[in-house]
Image: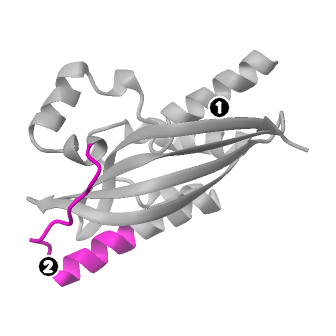
Amino acid sequence: MLKKSILAVFTLLILTACGNKKEDMSAEERAKVIEDGTVGFEMMGENVEKATNVPAEEEKAILGAFDEYIAALNAEEIERYMQTISKNPKGFKYDEEEAYATEVFDQFDITRDVENVTIAKYGDGEAQVFANIRMHSLQVETNIEHESAGRQVTVFVKEDNHWKVTSVFYIGDDTKSTTGK
């Protein structure tokens, strides 16, 4: 049972945001995304610079979409969460995401705290939002608590005049698990 719990927590970390599974994106696709300027620098460097070419109205809309995405995840409201997701995502399969998210919401109580939210890249109907994220989770069945911190780039695309999540890249900095009280 403990192995299963540890595996579940590890899986949760790897699949933290949008069910990004290694098999969803080939190595070539990941390399192309990074080569095309999608992510990469935001994940590795110490400083993240704010994109200077974002119109004020778009900045407000993008940051609002990011806030709603995090709020929907924290509220564990599947319909609300799915409204934040692109119908044609690059980093995962839309049809599988709802089932995956529902399963995670059923098995874990998760809260994400975000800091340093910055639009790091903007253009051609795409925006990359960088954030430092601290994730607190409790596996309901085993009462194991887990905490992690990391850097996340959430890639948004403009779809039907709304900004939607198309892919998520997360690198964790540290983790800590404890058995609940």
The residue type indicated by label 1 comes to Val
Q: Horizontally, is 118 left or right of 127 in the view?
A: right
- Label 1 sits on a secondary structure element that is helix
The x, y position of residue 11, in whole percent, is 57, 28
Q: Residue furthest right?
A: 181
Q: Residue furthest bottom?
A: 57
User: Which stretch did the figure color magenta?
Assistant: 45-65
**Residue labelled with disc 2:** 55
Query: 150 and 21: which one is in front?
Result: 150
**Residue at the location (24% across, 66% down)?**
160
Mark 1 residue crowding within 10 angstroms, few (<14) / some (14–19) / many (20+): many
**Residue labelled with disc 1:** 9
| Residue 88 location, quadrant | top left
**Residue at the location (37% across, 74% down)?**
64
User: In what quadrant of the picture does the N terminus appear?
Assistant: top right
Is residue 55 rendered magenta in the image? yes
Query: In the rendered view, would you say 171 is above or below 82?
Result: above
Could you tell me if the residues under marks 1 and 2 are in contact, i.e. CB atoms within 8 Å?
A: no
The x, y position of residue 14, in whole percent, is 49, 32
Residue 93 in sight: yes
Q: Horizontally, is 46 left or right of 113 in the view?
A: left
